[in-house]
Amino acid sequence: MRAEAGFFERVYRLVEQVPPGRVATYGQIAALLGVPRGARAVGWALRALPERRAPTVPWHRVVGAGGRISPRAGGGPAAQRRRLRAEGVRFLGKGVDLDRHGLLQGLP
């Protein structure tokens, strides 16, 4: 469990660095953490985000491959889209315009 907690904390610290109006994909975050096939684990970390960390970790700036908002139960997808739009992020169809708002072009 300790290794998982360490990985989750590393995810949170990296996501904290994504500036307003920009997004990164789960895969990009994983690659930057040295876990190139760890996109799903990044998703697990963000899903387990403790309430005390939520105000400082902009989870809404992490999207699926191709800029997609990941489906999940509850109002999360709508809240994510709303928060991104409030930061000026534009959508092309159902996904974020990664050419315009992607933070890490050239990474998976």
Image: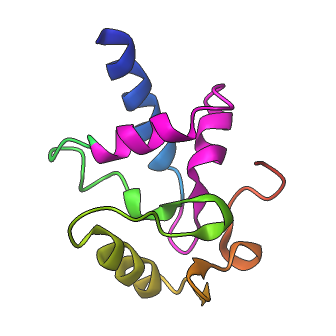
- Residue 79 at x, y = what percent? 30, 76
Q: Is residue 40 magenta?
A: yes
Q: Is residue 106 magenta?
A: no
| Image point (61%, 89%), residue name | 93
Figure quadrant of residue 102: bottom right
Q: Nearer the viewer, residue 71 or 106?
A: 71
* 55 on left or right of 82: left
- Residue 83 at x, y = what percent? 37, 78
| Image point (59%, 43%), residue name | 29
Compared with 74, 6 (above or below) is above
Compared with 14, 4 (above or below) is above
- Magenta span: 19-47
- Residue 90 at x, y = what percent? 59, 87
| Image point (37%, 39%), residue name | 44
| Image point (36%, 45%), residue name | 46
In the picture, the quarter occupied by the N terminus is top left
Q: Nearer the viewer, residue 87 or 29?
A: 29
